Amino acid sequence: MEPIPAPAIDLISLAPVLVLSVFGMMVLVTDLFIGKDKSILVFISLTGLLMAAVSSLAKYNLPVFSFNGAYVVDHLSVFFTFIFCISSALAILVSVDFNKREGIKVGEYYSLILFCTVGMVLLASSTDMIMIFLGIEVVSISLYILAGIQRKSTKSNEAALKYFLLGAFATGFLLYGMTLIYGSTGSTKLTIIANVISENKILSEPLMLMGVVLLIIGFGFKVAAVPFHMWAPDVYQGAPTPVTAFMAVGPKAATLAAFYRVMSETMPDLSYSWEILLCVVSVLSMFIGNLGAIMQSNIKRLLAFSSVAHVGYLIIAIIAKNSLSSSSLMFYMLSYAFMVFGTFGIVILLGRKGEENLELENYSGLAYKHPVIALTMTIFLLSLGGLPPLAGFVAKFFIFSAALKEGYIILVIIAVLNSAISFYYYLKVIVFMYMKEPVKEFHISLTPMTLLVIAISAFGTIQLGIFPDPIIALAQAN
């Protein structure tokens, strides 16, 4: 009997994962030899993210498959790796002043962000369901700990416990779905699964269809899509604000990238079985997310329901499954990263130690006392709503164009209607800032790192709205 050859190990393809892992461990080791000042850990973490972003460009003539076809470096994975590095860098920068203020002096905070980024890169690059599962677990375990990193805060502890229990439950659905698909196709590799499906061998296989439904449930929880979203408001509210911003962008983008690979690229021939289901999930996410946000008086809960609505828009790109889908998904997540980190950066600025000032009334009269901060917050909120000429408008237009190209006119009409509904609660915050009398004095500490994140986010939001062509060209390049 001939020996089975070992799968080829291509370390260059794995460069971003290796770089981030090495720097994550370097942060842990360095933390043993320094005191309470964690500035050096911030520098090490940002250096690691920069090197990971650069190393993702090491491969040419994409796509490049490695590890026996379980890992791919292609245009989608490279672009998403840049989004992950940008979102993780912004999360680290916005955490510096927040952590000092709230007394979070644990070095593993920064290493957990790096290890979470490792899982995100794995998710975006995996072409094997086992690798996808590993990526999701690396991301999830890091986020469980980050959500509860404020050990003395009961809200933070509650958020971590809820997220952990519900996350473990949802992982069971995901793994069970993968098991059924493996049983139906005889493989965990997406390329082989796609070939089996295209040969019409299992189009009506009950186990296969049940596996697809369970996969949607598992992915739906991870991206907080309705009806698997109820953890999001509580976890977003209880977690430290920089962690909330981070989990709203990077992990969500990574899961959507894997979701897109599994559904749009691997199972387009099975679309009759999951297309209508995803349409229902998308519509429910948009309506329940927006209507839920309208009823909130807490800014973090409002933004949590807003993120649920944005997932509804993003799922449209998966449903469309055409040449514009992946590029619209990439552009939307990059734009969303700037909008979210800018918004949460201002939320952090308005907080004080032990008093985060998260109620909408705490924003009353902000425009009179700090007009520049109020104007910047207005830009982010209007962009989230999709007002031209800001990044949010271009991102939504791009995704809606992909759907219209496939004839999903009713779905796009519903999405446009929901975008109009979303302006109600975004404008509600603006009304508090510009048209209400201050209820108390503002004690804003204009900390440099948080201001830097807000400035970068504002520039990105305006730049991607007015001059989107270069980034769109990059997103569409193959």
Image (tube, rainbow, N blue to C red):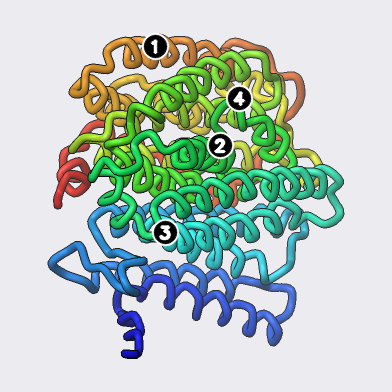
How much space separates mark 3 and mark 4, taking CA atoms?
54 Å
Q: If the image is split into quadrants, where does the N terminus sit?
A: bottom left
Considering depth in this image, is 336 or 329 the residue closer to the camera? 329
Q: How dense is the environment of label 3, judged by Cα within 10 Å: few (below 14), some, or many (20 and up)?
A: some
Residue 68 visible within the image: yes
Going by the numbered disc 1, the residue's amino acid type is Ile
> In front: mark 2 or mark 3?
3
Q: Which residue is drawn at 18% across and 49% down?
A: 474
Residue carrying label 3: 188
- Which is nearer the N-term, disc 1 or disc 2? 2
Q: In this view, does 293 lie above or below 456?
A: above
Label located before the other in sequence (2 or 3): 3
How far apart marks 2 and 4 lie (CA) works out to: 41 Å
Dividing the picture into quarters, in which one does residue 436 lie?
top right
Find numbered disc 3 in the image and state the secondary structure of the residue it sits on: loop
Residue 185: image location, x then y, percent: 39, 52
Could you say where residue 8 lies in the image, as x and y percent from the top left? 30, 81
Q: Which of marks 4 and 1 is nearer the N terminus?
A: 4
Q: What residue type is labelled 2?
A: Ile
Image coords of residue 97 (percent x, y): 63, 55
Question: Nearer the viewer's eye, disc 2 or disc 4?
Answer: 2
Seen at 35% across and 85% down, the residue is 4
- Whole-Å distance between the Cαs marked 4 and 1? 34 Å
Q: Mark 4 points at which residue?
A: 366
Which residue is more in the foreground, 183 or 23?
Answer: 183
Residue closest to the far front: 1
The mark lying in front, picked from 3 and 4, is 3
